[in-house]
Image: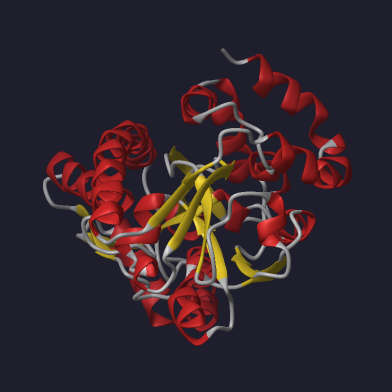
Amino acid sequence: MKRRDLLKLGVAASAFGATAFGLVKSVRADAKLVLKASDVHPPGYPTVVAVEEMGKKLETATGGRLSVQMYPSMQLGGEKEAIEQAQVGAIQIARVSVGALGPVVDDLNVFNLPFLFRNTAHMEKVIDGDIGKDLLNKVTDNPNTHLVGLCFMDAGARNIYNTKHPITSVADLKGLKVRVMGNPMFVDMMNALGSNGVPMGYDQVFSALQTGVVDGAENNPPSYVFDNHYQVAKYFTLTEHLIVPEIVVFSRKTWDTLSKADQELIAKLGREAQLRERELWVAKEKEAYAKMKAAGIKIVRIADKKPFQDAVKPVWDKYGAKYAELIKRIEAVQ
């Protein structure tokens, strides 16, 4: 090896630590590589299982050379921390909400507009088609993300739950402190509905509900149930104000050390994981509703969502214009 190349490797080792240097060496030597994956959700959750199954397929296809080690239940931190760790190569795979990645890749924020999708079936057609591919490419092709967009995953519709009282109208939200993901669009959305939007990492929500730091939060039924928020917040209202998909991203730092064949294999398995997670999601959502009913949760269905849609018009006025063309494409999907 030339002296110049040795110097480059030395700088890389100093900058990124012995782990990063060892990773590059192991990939180049065709040795076994364990890809670290992070998810805030617990074992058995659809996104966790889908990535684990993707890892098993990868291990089989490469004869054990590449595999995935999943770290669920926020073992490696919340979604913001997962994104940051993937960006520097400390982990390789991060499953996060599009809401959490929106501040990093602005075009993804179109999915964060309240009441954008007609229903979850509409959302699925969008992420499965050209729009979904284009937005994944926006993640991959942006030199500032240091990430590769692998696939989208279903996350159902997000609804509001709280510890105080049933939400049957917009007026019932007035004054409530409601946790949202750390995205200004969500804070503005919740404020427009009359409550106080509180940006907070997902790993902090349960204790915040317990201690009264927040009065409520908003999420899909499986997250509400299987992350135990239902134990402290007994009122669940089907506002379905957001249908925000999840996204799986891969560390660019690690990706660039892989062969083109390995990259193509991981991309292919990512697409398969997108569809597999959907199957798992449908089953888990049914299970969540059954558990909610058994626990005596007060479930409120909103028959007329127009007052909620009207209330968030200021959010569309503030953020929607820049995504006008993309919104037209989304609305045209049948």
Residue 73, visible in the rendered structure: yes
244, above or below 272, in the image = below
Could you tell whether 165 is left or right of 293 in the image?
right
Q: Residue at x 51, y 81 (%)?
A: 208
Residue 312, visible in the rendered structure: no
**The quadrant where residue 108 appears:** top right
Residue 189 image position (x, y, % from top left): 73, 53
Residue 70 image position (x, y, % from top left): 26, 62
**The quadrant where residue 240 appears:** top right
Residue 72 image position (x, y, % from top left): 30, 66
Residue 183 image position (x, y, % from top left): 69, 60
**Most foreground residue, 39 or 17:** 39
Q: Residue at x 59, y 77 (%)?
A: 214
238, above or below 171, in the image = above
328, above or below 79, in the image = above
Q: Residue at x 13, y 52 (%)?
A: 64
Q: Residue at x 64, y 36 (%)?
A: 305
